[in-house]
Image: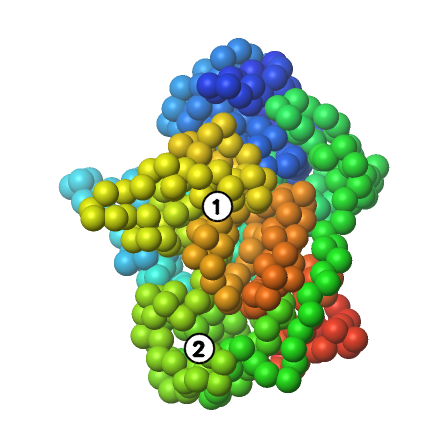
Amino acid sequence: MSIQKDQLIMKGISKTFPGVKALDEVSFEIISGEVHSLIGQNGAGKSTLMGILNGITKPDDGQILFNNKVVKIDDPKDAFNLNLSIVHQEFALCNNLTVAENIYLGDEPHNKSGFVNYKKMHLDAKILLESINVNLSTNKIVGNLNTSQWQIIEICKALAKKPKFIVMDEPTASLDEKQIDNLFEIINTLKNNGIGIIYISHKLKEIIHISDRITVLKDGKINDSFLKNEVNEEGLIKSMIGKNISIKNNNQNIINFQKPILKINNYSYSNTFKKIRMDLYEGEILGLSGLLGSGANELLRCIFGIIKQDNGQLSLNDKVVTINKPRDAIVNGIGYIPSDRKNEGLIQNNSIKDNSVLTIFNKLTKMGFFKFNAAAKTTNNYVKKLDIKASNIDSFVMNLSGGNQQKVVIAKWLVKNCKILLFDEPTRGIDIAAKTQIWKLISEFTNEGGSVIVVSNEIPELIINCNRIITMQKGLISNTFNHEDFNEQKISLNISSK
């Protein structure tokens, strides 16, 4: 006897924003117990379509049907009532609360007296975690946990609503390889429990691995749909972009390995990393790779002065410099592109122009007056140079795609004429075409004499684009690979936990 499956259909959905046709008669379907992936370039319409499904955005036309019955989703509460949940790319957690309190935030169980029933809340949270085979104390303070555990809590928040369908938006963007494997086990458990999952990611290899079906959005329309065994990465790229594409940048940078531009000597910070010795040469792209907890990301933040090392020295052109705060780094020609571009790299409510000239604001101010024409001219130059897609330079950065937001962050440092750029996961959450452009910009910067350190766990990208790769493990440098020694398997072994 076959079990009746739930079905969710978005039919003929259209949405137009000022000057942009975001969605044009898009139809998308998912049934319970399957993973249906939705892919496309930044700006293809994925976020708009999911915003409509979750009641954040109202469509201009089209219908949503649940088990062949037309339903209305005017706000997120309507979505919850229809057993729809979403796991957002950006975490929305309260760091000072426990795991259980975060899972049931706003939906806490109460006793007969009207007080929160903490005993039941922790018990329910424990049962929920066990249902996806996760062993995590419900009493742990969320701020003390790692990124992978935050992702699990976000999933549990969605599951607490007892959904029949879950949207997962870039769920692996902040996870390392081991954590991704754990997430995929959770997804398979959810599938076996009859939950349908709409999976959104730019990582095509994992899309093919985890999906039952794959739908491609292009320019606001459905371009193709595939079963997982019908397509490979090259086919998906061609469907998304219209042509085959490679992230190779053909770097022609000339490096002077005789004299380092930046020298780190015996850097240590808390229990995060220790006794780090590292050189960066003029014109070099230096890759730095390590799993969560390796200290790689924190090392970049330390070089930029966001955190202060406990001991050690940093030298620029053989001169010891003291960097106690980001301003010290900027004065010494160092720029930083953070992994969290939305919260740390940009002012979301400000324009492209405002963000692009942020680092040279004083230069553009004379006798208390801001040079608006000069700011506009500078911004337009970099919008053209970096191929930033926007209607105009006064557009808010919050309305740009991830790839274009990343370019604005880079523009902010290029206008400052930095000599060294520190990139923390520069291609996280952006499509392959945007990745190609980001690496091209990095290459051009080093070809003009700049130097770059890139922290990333996208090892194939590092192999193609870097001159050297340093691996880190548990706060220590585990190995250094020169270009002629690059090997994906060996590099992966040097970042994995022993």
Amino acid type, mark 2: Thr
Q: Which of 361 and 101 is in front in this view?
A: 361
Instruction: Answer whether residue 110 is visible to the viewer in this image.
Output: yes
Is disc 1 surrounded by few (<14), some (14 to 19) or many (20+) residues within 10 Å?
many
Residue found farthest to the left: 113
In the foreground, 280 or 398: 280
Q: Name the residue under label 1.
A: 408
Q: Looking at the image, which residue is at 44% across and 67% down? A: 333
Q: Residue sitting at 76 percent across and 32 percent down?
A: 242
Which dot marks residue 272? 2
Q: In which quarter of the image is the N terminus?
A: top right
- Residue 349 locus on image (x, y percent): 34, 38
Secondary structure of residue under mark 1: helix
- Judge left or right: residue 457 versus residue 145: right
Q: Check disc 2: other Cα within 10 Å, few if <14, some if 14-19, many if 20+.
A: some
Does residue 234 lie above or below 299 as drawn? above
Q: In this view, does 490 lie to the left or right of 352?
A: right
The residue drawn where x is 72% and y is 52% is 247
Is 85 situated above or below 65? Answer: below
Counting from the top left corner in percent of width and height, residue 29 is at 64, 24
Q: Which amino acid does label 1 sit on?
A: Val
